[in-house]
């Protein structure tokens, strides 16, 4: 029997947000939280999923937390869980931008699929 291997976020390919704005640690943190809006993560889980050193994650996460972009969601044992603050104006704008870009890409792809009718 073949065992299935866990697929890490870092192995899923580039998102529209990262393709458009780069691969900074802060954007990568925002991206994983935006991509998984129904989940919360501990800092350790984020570091693992992002294939990022804990030092880099902690340094950048602190800034996002101070700005209110990420927020505490709950405590599970000794692990503190966090999620994206969907009410933050910057988060709302980023979400709107990525949705708009996704829609534009989808529309362009649809145009490629529809055969051209010549009069």
Image (cartoon, grey):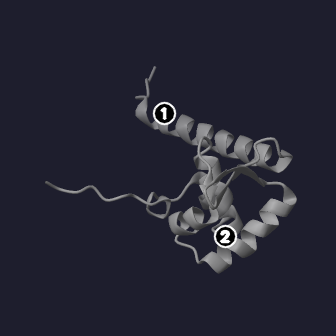
Relative to residue 33, is residue 94 drawn left or right?
Answer: right
- Which of the numbered marks, if any, corresponds to residue 94? none
Task: Give the residue at x 79% y 54%.
Answer: 69
Q: Nearer the viewer, residue 74 or 43?
A: 74
- Which of the numbered marks, if any, corresponds to residue 25? 2
Relative to residue 25, is residue 6 drawn left or right?
Answer: left
Looking at the picture, does residue 101 appear above or below residue 76?
above
The quadrant of the image that shows the N terminus is bottom left
Task: Give the residue at x 66% y 77%.
Answer: 56
- Secondary structure under badge 2? helix
Residue identified by numbered label 1:
110
- Secondary structure under badge 1? helix
Question: Label 1: how many residues lie within 10 Å, few (<14), some (14-19) or many (20+)?
Answer: few
Task: Give the residue at x 82% y 50%.
Answer: 90
Looking at the picture, does residue 38 appear above or below residue 19?
above
Residue 39 x, y percent position in the rendering: 59, 46
Q: Nearer the viewer, residue 3 or 79?
A: 79
Question: Disc 1 and disc 2: Cα gap in Å?
Answer: 33 Å
Residue 115 x, y percent position in the rendering: 40, 29
Residue 89 visible somewhere in the drawing: yes
């Amino acid at each position: 029997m073949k065992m299935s291997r866990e697929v890490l976020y870092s192995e899923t390919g580039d998102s529209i947000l990262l393709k458009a704005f780069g691969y900074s640690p802060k954007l990568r943190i925002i991206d994983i939280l935006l991509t998984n809006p129904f989940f919360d993560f501990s800092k350790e889980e984020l570091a693992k999923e992002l294939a990022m050193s804990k030092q880099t994650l902690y340094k950048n996460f602190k800034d996002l937390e101070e700005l209110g972009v990420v927020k505490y969601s709950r405590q599970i044992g000794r692990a503190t869980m966090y999620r994206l603050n969907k009410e933050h104006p910057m988060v709302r704008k980023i979400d709107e931008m990525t949705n708009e870009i996704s829609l534009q890409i989808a529309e362009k792809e649809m145009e490629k699929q529809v055969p051209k009718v010549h009069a």
